[in-house]
Image (spheres, rainbow, N blue to C red):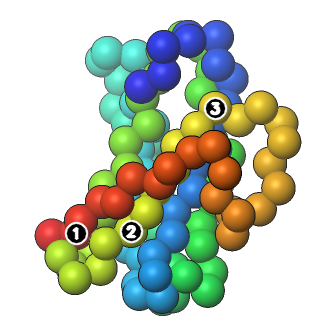
Amino acid sequence: SFPNPMMERCHVALRTEGRPLDADLELWQGPDNTPMKMRVYVEDGGLRPFGAIIETPRGPNTVAVRNIGQLEFPMETIVSVDDGTFTSTANFQADSKPMTIQGG
């Protein structure tokens, strides 16, 4: 969840250390809405990291990332405000530290 309700989009980046990446992404808009869901599967998350720009219009939104892979396949995740300078998912932002999410 982001503190600024005027934010229009966010950047989601997922990667692993060469293991399979299996995740669910959800966009929750408002307190009573059904989430929009995206399933992500990549055979080698180190070679082919996943990145997406998600539009978050009209007020407060929440982006949820869940690792649905096995416990042995953790992933690194960054969800940040998109400021229009998207370059590459392979280069995680230098000022952001990815969060490791265990599977299971």
Q: In which quadrant will I find the N terminus?
A: top left
| Residue 66, x across and y down, in percent | 31, 55
| Residue 15: numbered disc | none
Instruction: Determine contact: label 1, label 2, CB under 8 Å.
Output: yes
Judging by the rendered image, the residue that carries numbered circle 2 is 75
- Residue 79 falls left or right of residue 104: right
Judging by the rendered image, the residue that carries numbered circle 1 is 103
Judging by the rendered image, the residue that carries numbered circle 3 is 81
- Please give the name of the residue rendered at 34% of the width and 32% of the height, measured from the top-left corner: 34
Q: Is residue 29 above or below residue 82?
A: above
The kind of residue on which mark 3 rests is: Val
Q: Is residue 44 visible?
A: yes
Secondary structure under the numbered disc 3 in the rendered image: strand
The kind of residue on which mark 1 rests is: Gly
Q: Is residue 83 above or below residue 15?
A: above
- Figure quadrant of residue 19: bottom left
Q: Is residue 79 above or below residue 68?
A: above
Precedes in sequence: disc 1 or disc 2? 2
| Residue 83, x across and y down, in percent | 77, 32
Precedes in sequence: disc 1 or disc 3? 3
> What distance separates the C-alpha of mark 3 from that of mark 2?
20 Å
- Please give the name of the residue rendered at 80% of the width and 48% of the height, measured from the top-left corner: 86
Instruction: Determine contact: label 1, label 3, CB under 8 Å.
Output: no
> What distance separates the C-alpha of mark 1 from that of mark 3?
25 Å
| Residue 98, x across and y down, in percent | 47, 54
